[in-house]
Every structure is written in C-alpha cells, then in structure tokens.
Amino acid sequence: MTTARDAIAADLPRIGQSLAAAFDDDPLWEWLTPDKDRYRRTAAAFFERDAALRLGTPGRILVDDDVRGAAIWCAPGAWSSSVGDAARILRPSLALFGRRTLTGLNALRSLEKAHPVGPPHWYLSVIGTDPDHQGKGIGSGLIATVTEECDREGIPAYLESSKEANVSYYARHGFAVTEEFTLKGGPSLWLMWRDPR
C-alpha cells in the first residue's frame, strides 16, 4: 500500500490530470460528458479547479508522492456544497459539460439529498488513480489514511461509487452498500457506508 500525503498547491495540475484519466471510462462521467473529445480537452481543468477550491477547507486532499492518484475527503459536517461553490467552478463546468451543465447540477443536488445527514462522518467525495498506475496500492493508501483515523476516533465514513466494478474494492476497505441510487435519466450509483472498526 502506497503512503499518502496531504496535497499542496503545486500538486493541483497533476491532480487534475490524474483524476481526469481515472474517470475517463466512468459511467457517470460518460453520461454527463458524452463527447469524449470534449471530456479529454477539459476534464483536467475541471478537476484541478475543484481540488483548488477545497484546499484549505475542512477536510483533506490526499495524493501519493508522484500524484498518480488523489482523494478528496470532506470532514464531518463539511460535505454539502453551496450556490457559491457552484459559482466558483462554473467556468470549468461550462467548458466540460456545455449544455449538460444543468444536468450535472441536478445530479449533484439529487446525490446531496440522498447523502446521510448523520451521524457525523468523513465523506470520500472523489478518488481516482491514473489508469497507468492502478493496482499498485495507491488508492488503498488514499483511503486507509483517513479510515484508520476514523477507526481511532470512532467516526464513520461514506462514499458514492459510480462504477459497480468498484463496489467490491470499497468493500475490502470496510464500506457496505446501503442503497443503489439511480439518477433521473442516468446511471446508477452505489451509496456506501463504513462504520468504524
């Protein structure tokens, strides 16, 4: 398992590239951005901006030393997004989603409504590893850094998996499916909860 560290501003461009590569074949992202060329031109800037907005907020952005993978963890009570958050990422959202920007915002709203309100928990909002480096323990390190803290402090964790094939991977880290959630006109996601061990 790879050791994770907290990201710094200099990591942001590589975070954008790694996450864009990681989600290139993801069913949710394929639904939101069916134009693959557009996705590949604009996704890295979107993920970079999203990570930049989260630096210095409650939570953690974790990377491996070479930034081949990244995870965005929201601290307990700090997972919901605001209208201001949406406005701050509007330009890269429009570049990425184009006419499907409203669809993306509605999908985000639907997921927020399904998000458990309590008890307080860490939220793994985004995790991905560049496909060229998957299977090397990078993702496990990005998860375990926070779940080990959860276990020590008795705090649960939560995530949504947008790829069914990843459900068993998260299960190995202690997450269990609580609901299969289908977006209106879109793909399914698996809502997963982890009690502390």
Image (cartoon, rainbow, N blue to C red):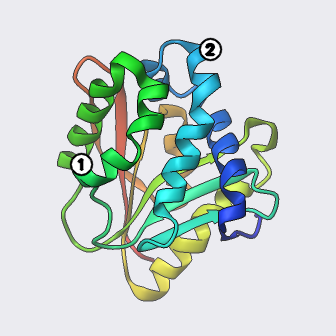
Is residue 82 toward the left or the right of residue 19 in the image? left
- The percent position of residue 103, horizontal first and vertical second, equals 28, 25
Quadrant holding the C terminus: bottom left
Q: Secondary structure under badge 2?
A: helix
Q: Nearer the viewer, residue 22 or 116?
A: 22
- The percent position of residue 133, horizontal first and vertical second, equals 80, 44
The label on residue 37 is: 2
- The percent position of residue 88, horizontal first and vertical second, equals 38, 49
Q: Nearer the viewer, residue 42 or 146?
A: 42
Decide which of tag 1 and tag 2 comes sooner along the chain. 2
The label on residue 112 is: 1
Is residue 193 toward the left or the right of residue 150 in the image? left
Quadrant of res 12: bottom right
Q: Is residue 190 above or below residue 71?
A: above
Under mark 1, the amino acid is Glu
Quadrant holding the N terminus: bottom right
Q: Nearer the viewer, residue 56 or 166?
A: 56
Is residue 133 toward the left or the right of residue 47 in the image? right
Point 49% across, 73% down: residue: 56
Point 75% across, 56% down: residue: 67
- The percent position of residue 134, horizontal first and vertical second, equals 75, 43
Q: Is residue 150 above or below residue 143?
A: below
Neighbours of disc 1 within 10 Å: few (<14), some (14-19), many (20+): some
